[in-house]
Amino acid sequence: MTDDAILAAAERVLSVEAAALSALARDLPADFTGAVRAIRACTGRVIVAGVGKSGHVGRKIAATLASTGTQASFVHPTEASHGDLGMIGSGDICLLISNSGETAELRDLLAYAKRFAIPLVGLSSRADSTLMRAAGFRLLLPPMAEACPMGLAPTTSTTAALALGDALAVALMELRGFGAEHFAAFHPGGKLGAQLARVEEFMHGGDAIPLVPVGADMGETLLEMTSKGFGITAVTDAAGRLAGVVTDGDLRRNMTDLMTRRAGEIATPDPVTAAPGMMAAQALGLLNARKISVLIVCDDDRRPVGVLHIHDLLRAGVA
């Protein structure tokens, strides 16, 4: 098999699956909005179940729902038949996935849902299947060819099911107003967690903040800048509010008569600042856009409460 043939096979698969997703977007299941609203109204969890490739898809859908604010768990149908049905409560809603809609392992789940009046969402490609006849909300996939050349291996159908699960999760996010601050609570680890963290988690506060009053002489100002090591000091007025900042650049620009000046005389007025609750990634973008390395962090009354250095953000993986 030549390299061109390998690339052609890959292109064919992606084209077939892309066309299927486009068709799905143009013809979403009639029950999609009903399923979204039913899940939103549910007081318990979304119980997702499937077998084989549908099970793998179901696990990912459950994980995506859970990470975007919708309580969800994956229950394996076989384990459910051996005691895990007890994990499903009356306030839950079931999302069962089966391309054929005739997966034998789902039968006990179907019977359990019917017995205890648990709302059921079915995701399948066959409208007349056992699963879809039992479901109160039917997420029917449109006819689509599998990308497998023999038309046997679940490829296009699993991609479509996965994408429809993503559509459910995102629609639910937007319906409940799930924002970045909520997302951060569910993703505290790794690079994503760092990007979603707040400035207050990285800033230096207390005695580490370089501060001088507007009337400070240059000896005091230089000592404060040198001892704190940020190459900057905040300059505050009589009420403790930020009046400006003195940077290394300000010192160089005033070298001729520097030691005769006061901090307030050479300070850069109205400097760019950050708020403690600002997203860390936003603060990094601000530092890069202004081509600076340090931000003074101020509260709502413009009183300095911290100092943030770009290196603190980069070390933490905010990029």
Image (cartoon, rainbow, N blue to C red):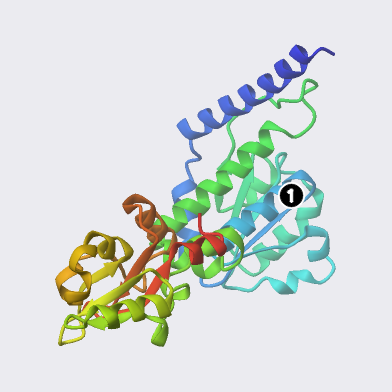
The N terminus is located in which quarter? top right
- Badge 1 density bin: few <14, some 14–19, many ≥20, Cα 10 Å: some
Residue located 39% across and 58% down the image = 282
Q: Is residue 137 left or right of residue 129?
A: left
Q: Position of residue 213 (x, y in %)?
A: 21, 83
Q: Is residue 76 left or right of residue 289?
A: right
Q: Between residues 238 and 129, which one lies in front from this camera angle? A: 238
Q: Quadrant of residue 71?
A: bottom right
Q: Is residue 265 left or right of residue 205?
A: left
Which amino acid type is marked by label 1?
His
Residue 194 vertical placement versus 127 (above, below):
below
Residue 98 vertical placement versus 8 (above, below):
below
Q: Position of residue 92 (x, y in %)?
A: 59, 68
Report the residue marked by disc 1: 56
Q: For mark 1, give the secondary structure.
A: helix
- Residue 269 appearing in the image: no
Q: Between residues 264 and 123, which one lies in front from this camera angle? A: 264
Q: Quadrant of residue 293?
A: bottom left
Q: Position of residue 156 (x, y in %)?
A: 67, 31
Q: Between residues 208 and 182, which one lies in front from this camera angle? A: 208
Q: Is residue 165 left or right of residue 31?
A: right
- Residue 220 appearing in the image: yes
Q: How many marks?
A: 1
In the displayed orientation, state which residue is furthest to the front: 256
Residue 238 vertical placement versus 259 (above, below):
below
Residue located 29% across and 83% down the image = 220
Q: Position of residue 248 (x, y in %)?
A: 33, 64
Residue located 70% across and 46% down the image = 130
